Image (tube, coloured by chain):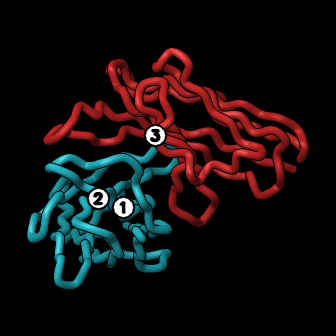
């Protein structure tokens, strides 16, 4: 079974530029998460989708970050414009999320390492 | 609110030494608790989990017991190997009806290096 795919793996941009990350979850997984992992810290949730709807985006800096999952499968996270403090690894995760008693383990992709200069 | 505190790293051990990485949590309700591992150049992988008090999660020689009275979930291994060198993250999620819900709350991670 293929895992969570992310691209690109690395990205270097200058501040005020725009950048987009792509995630393809495990086939059949209804729930998709984007986490931000700043160096030396644990991952923090940016946004959670259930199919193509947003469940939780309370920690997403909406003035510069946006995300979509139009067909309920793959997802794109965008930053526009980027700031120095956005330098981090952006992790995508997915889970089956089939209801009570279900194993809702999150499976993580390899991440995209963003450096903002 | 929900949060996880884990011991500061890095931790450096010789092969076959005993490992303990401390983790305590603050949560509303009764969370599920996890340990994730991140090997160099790879994504996060679930190492073990426990979904209710007194449960013991175990995998690959690692163990952790869900202690509600001390709000702790310490990771232990009796004899570490060089291949265990990685970053270890303690995490929690809310639980409802036996299912884990939504977002994971992570600790800062503990870097473990094992020397031969």
The front one of A40 and B77 is A40
Residue A31, given in percent of the width and then of the height, sits at 39, 32
Q: Helix or strand or loop: what does disc 2 sit on?
A: strand
The front one of B114 and A108 is A108
Q: CA distance from mark 2 to mark 3?
A: 22 Å
Q: CA distance from mark 1 to mark 3?
A: 20 Å
Chain that bears disc 3: A
**On residue B34, which mark appears?**
2
Residue B111 seen anywhere in this rendered image of the structure: no
Number of other residues with Cα within 10 Å of mark 2, as a class: few under 14, some 14 to 19, many 20 or more: many
Q: Residue at x 62, y 39 (%)?
A: A112
Q: Residue at x 40, y 54 (%)?
A: B104
Residue A9, given in percent of the width and then of the height, sits at 63, 34
Query: Which chain: red?
Result: A
**Residue mark closest to the camera, 1 vs 3:** 3
- Dividing the picture into quadrants, the one containing residue B81 is bottom left
Task: Return the residue at label 1.
Answer: B91
Number of other residues with Cα within 10 Å of mark 1, as a class: few under 14, some 14 to 19, many 20 or more: many
Task: Return the residue at label 3.
Answer: A55
Residue B23, given in percent of the width and then of the height, sits at 33, 75
């Amino acid at each position: 079974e293929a895992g969570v795919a992310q691209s690109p793996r690395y990205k270097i941009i200058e501040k005020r530029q725009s950048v987009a990350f792509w995630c393809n979850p495990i086939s059949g997984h209804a729930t998709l998460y984007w986490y931000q992992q700043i160096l030396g810290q644990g991952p923090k949730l940016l946004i959670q989708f259930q199919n193509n709807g947003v469940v939780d985006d309370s920690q997403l800096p909406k003035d510069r970050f946006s995300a979509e999952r139009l067909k309920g499968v793959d997802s794109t996270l965008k930053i526009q414009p980027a700031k120095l403090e956005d330098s981090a690894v952006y992790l995508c995760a997915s889970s089956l999320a089939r209801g009570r008693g279900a194993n809702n383990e999150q499976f993580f992709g390899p991440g995209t390492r963003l450096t903002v200069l | 609110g929900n949060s996880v505190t884990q011991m500061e790293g890095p931790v450096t051990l010789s092969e076959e030494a005993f490992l303990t990485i401390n983790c305590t949590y603050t949560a509303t309700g009764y969370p599920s608790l996890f340990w994730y591992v991140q090997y160099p150049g790879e994504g996060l992988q679930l190492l073990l989990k426990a979904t209710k008090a007194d449960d013991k999660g175990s995998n690959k020689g690692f163990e952790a017991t869900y202690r509600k009275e001390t709000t702790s979930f310490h990771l232990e291994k009796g004899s570490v190997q060089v291949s265990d060198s990685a970053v270890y993250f303690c995490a929690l999620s809310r639980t409802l009806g036996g299912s884990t819900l939504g977002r994971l709350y992570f600790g800062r991670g503990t870097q473990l290096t094992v020397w031969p």
